[in-house]
Amino acid sequence: MPDLLPHIEINPKTPATASVIWLHGLGADGHDFAPLVPELKLPSSMAVRFIFPHAPAIPVTINGGYIMPAWYDILAMNLEREIDEAQLLASSHAISALIDREIERGIDSRRIIIAGFSQGGAVAYHAALSYPKPLGGLMALSSYFATHKTLVPNAANATLAIAIFHGVYDSVVSETLGGQALQALRRQGFSPVYKSYLMEHEVCMEEVADISQWLQARLA
């Protein structure tokens, strides 16, 4: 087993029967979304374990080489985003190791959801769609599908349930990129749920309610 990413783990009161692996955005860490778990108000009968990994600290070109938590380097902030794809693939591989570990702990792969916000969502897309066993779902929040031109989805996840949530006023990751991800996925035969919110690059309570509803539908 490779060294696992450091992470926060929030366990249910009863033995877990499902897992959500949730990736933070650039410059944040696993603590960013952990406080949302109680806000999801999931029924205790669902017994979901939440895992919030921390990205490694690396120099980020668009921030003048400043070292911060990042899943990969961003070289330019044009609409398409010039990124270090090798670093994204390494991060995706690290998330796959966390999925493997959940399966080893007895969680059915079809009850494992991968979620990611912003830069974390780009890694979530790649990790979930390339994983060799069927997963429970993929949730991309205020994000973009960075590897849509090169990734060939694994046949095991050819019918993966996907939800894309985005802010209409997002000035960090334009909603245009959320729409591009939707179209790229449709071209590959997926049928994602797409919903936008009157918000910036953030999470709002209406979205939290929708995340909860979607998770409950996937893991009921």
Image (cartoon, rainbow, N blue to C red):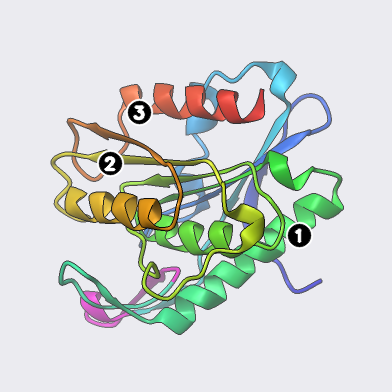
Disc 3 secondary structure class: helix
Work out whether mark 2 precedes mark 3 in sequence or the reverse, and give the earlier one.
2
Quarter holding the N terminus is bottom right
Where does the image place residue 128, in percent across and percent down from the top left?
57, 57
Task: Residue under label 2, please give it.
Answer: 166
| Residue 176 vertical position relative to residue 60 in the rendered view, above or below | above
Give the side of residue 114 with respect to residue 71, left or right. right
Amino acid type assigned to the residue bearing label 1 in the image: Asp
| Residue 74 vertical position relative to residue 32 in the rendered view, above or below | below
Amino acid type assigned to the residue bearing label 3 in the image: Glu
Work out whether mark 1 precedes mark 2 in sequence or the reverse, and give the earlier one.
1
| Residue 135 vertical position relative to residue 205 in the rendered view, above or below | below
Disc 2 secondary structure class: strand
Measured Cα–Cα span from mark 1 to mark 3:
29 Å
How many residues crowd around disc 3 within 10 Å: few (fewer than 14), some, or many (20 or more)? some
Give the side of residue 184 with respect to residue 30, left or right. left
Q: Which residues are magenta?
A: 60-71
- Residue at horizontal 78 percent and vertical 57 percent from the top: 101
Task: Residue under label 1, please give it.
Answer: 100
How many residues crowd around disc 1 within 10 Å: few (fewer than 14), some, or many (20 or more)? some
Where does the image place residue 135, in percent across and percent down from the top left?
65, 48
Q: Is residue 2 magenta?
A: no
Task: Residue under label 3, please give it.
Answer: 207
Depth check, front residue: 102 or 29:
102
